[in-house]
Image (cartoon, rainbow, N blue to C red):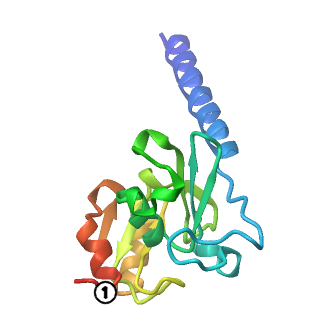
């Protein structure tokens, strides 16, 4: 019985490690000195801890100066019709930079602190973390008002952060 349990745990552990390695390989913030934010037209290399990226299924890479700018594009890509995004199916990967580790993480699985006393190149912003615990800890140290999952961020919050409400 113990052998079966041990074998099962070993298989599950190796599968989760493999998926982590595969996922980690694809998460690269490969911007250069010419990479410009689609929304704000800022050079993203100047503030690498805030960079976000969307890679399209056609291979095109879109960079953003902050999570807020990326989410603004993600929620209403038609506003930038010249890029040619027709639906969410056009997004291959959506990444943000974890504020603690400075490593790229999946934006749709990240947690964001709203209302903190830390600003990005785009002004008031959402500070991304790979775990809820890290986001909660940051929020308590920096006057964060809420921790939100990606799917909890409404368009109205982005407008509020941009000063349009």
99 vs 133, left or right, is: right
Residue 121 lies, with reference to residue 105, above or below; the image says below
Furthest-bottom residue in this view: 117
Residue 29 lies, with reference to residue 11, above or below; the image says below
5 vs 150, left or right, is: right
Q: How many marks?
A: 1
The quadrant in which the C terminus is found is bottom left
Residue annotated with mark 1: 163
Where residue 67 sits in the image (x, y, percent)?
47, 69
Where residue 147 sits in the image (x, y, percent)?
32, 68
Residue under the image location 52 percent in, 18 percent down: 8
Image quadrant where residue 57 sits: top right
Image quadrant where residue 148 sits: bottom left
Where residue 70 sits in the image (x, y, percent)?
47, 65
Residue 117 lies, with reference to residue 34, above or below; the image says below
Dot 1 falls on a residue whose secondary structure is loop
Residue under the image location 53 percent in, 55 percent down: 83
Residue 34 visible in the current orientation: yes
Residue 145 visible in the current orientation: no
Residue under the image location 29 percent in, 63 percent down: 153
Q: Nearer the viewer, residue 79 or 95?
A: 79
Mark 1 burial class by Cα count in 10 Å: few <14, some 14-19, many 20+: few
Where residue 30 sits in the image (x, y, percent)?
73, 58
Q: Nearer the viewer, residue 45 or 24?
A: 45
Furthest-right residue in this view: 33
Residue under the image location 61 percent in, 80 percent down: 42
């Amino acid at each position: 019985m113990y052998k079966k349990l041990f074998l099962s745990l070993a298989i599950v552990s190796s599968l989760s490690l493999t998926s982590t390695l595969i996922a980690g390989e694809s998460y690269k913030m490969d911007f250069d000195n010419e990479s410009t934010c689609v929304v704000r037209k800022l050079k993203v290399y100047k503030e690498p801890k805030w960079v976000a990226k969307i890679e399209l299924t056609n291979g095109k890479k879109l960079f953003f100066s902050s999570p807020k700018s990326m989410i603004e594009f993600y929620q209403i890509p038609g506003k930038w019709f010249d890029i040619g995004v027709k639906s969410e199916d056009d997004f291959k990967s959506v990444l943000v930079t974890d504020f603690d580790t400075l490593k790229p993480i999946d934006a749709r699985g990240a947690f964001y602190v709203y209302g903190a006393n830390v600003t990005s190149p785009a002004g008031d912003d959402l500070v991304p973390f790979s775990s809820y615990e890290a986001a909660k800890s940051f929020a308590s140290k920096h006057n964060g008002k809420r921790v939100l999952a990606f799917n909890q961020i409404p368009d109205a919050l982005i407008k509020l952060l941009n000063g349009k409400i």
